[in-house]
Image: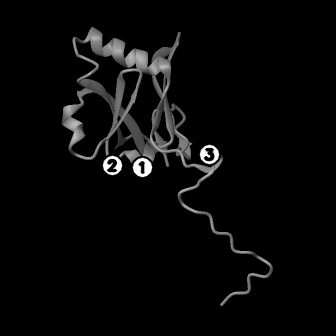
Amino acid sequence: MSDCGDVKKVFVSAAVVPPSTQSIVGIEITDTAAEKIKLFLTNDGKSPDEYGLYIAVVKDGCSGKSYTMSLDPIANHQDNGDKLFTRNGATVIVDKLSYLFVTGSRLDYAEALTGSGFNLINPNVKKTCSCGSSFAV
């Protein structure tokens, strides 16, 4: 047995976790991203109640992984283990195998002169390629 010196054992009940130490699970969706998802669905003739933004991580690029996004029917993803997140009537669907790569991320939408689109701010990314289109975790 190892000598732990003066270290005291502290037991914290699993049912009582202070808010500042709770782990982040899921995807945070900004109000702007939610509104854009609903706008794109409506413009495409799809109901926000039946469709959502599907996100998956695929092997691609010089850093190894990249994101794919599409507007998919929610029903196709409910029974196969994919994760669903909603905000203001907009649904984001995360592929079940990709969830571990993006948990704790924030989905936003940005408009700029150089380009507009969804931006996934992912705390799990350890490095990106120089063009910013792929990443490694």
Where is residue 35, by image quadrant?
A: top left
Where is residue 60, by image quadrant?
A: top left
C-alpha separation, residue under disc 3 versus residue under disc 2: 28 Å
Residue 8: x %, y % from top left: 74, 75
C-alpha separation, residue under disc 1 versus residue under disc 3: 22 Å
Q: Could you classify mark 2 by the number of other residues whose Cα lies within 10 Å: few (under 14), some (14-19), or many (20 or more)?
A: some
Left or right, 48 with reference to 4:
left
Residue 14 versus residue 18 in the image, above or below: below
Quadrant showing the N terminus: bottom right
Residue 116 versus residue 7 in the image, above or below: above
Name the element at disc 1. Answer: helix
Earlier in the chain: of badge 3 and badge 2, it is: 3
Q: Which residue is mark 3?
A: 19
Residue 76 versus residue 21 in the image, above or below: above
Amino acid on which disc 3 is placed: Pro
In front: 21, or 136? 21
Q: Could you classify mark 3 by the number of other residues whose Cα lies within 10 Å: few (under 14), some (14-19), or many (20 or more)?
A: few
Residue 65: x %, y % from top left: 41, 43
Left or right, 3 with reference to 120:
right
Q: Could you classify mark 1 by the number of other residues whose Cα lies within 10 Å: few (under 14), some (14-19), or many (20 or more)?
A: some
Residue 123: x %, y % from top left: 55, 42
Amino acid on which disc 2 is placed: Leu
In front: 39, or 16? 16
Q: Which residue is mark 2?
A: 97
Amino acid on which disc 1 is placed: Leu
Q: Which residue is mark 1?
A: 100
Earlier in the chain: of badge 1 and badge 3, it is: 3
Residue 116: x %, y % from top left: 46, 15
C-alpha separation, residue under disc 2 versus residue under disc 1: 7 Å
The answer to the question of whether label 2 and label 1 lie on touching residues, with beta carbons closer than 8 A, is: yes
Of circles 3 and 2, the one toward us is 3
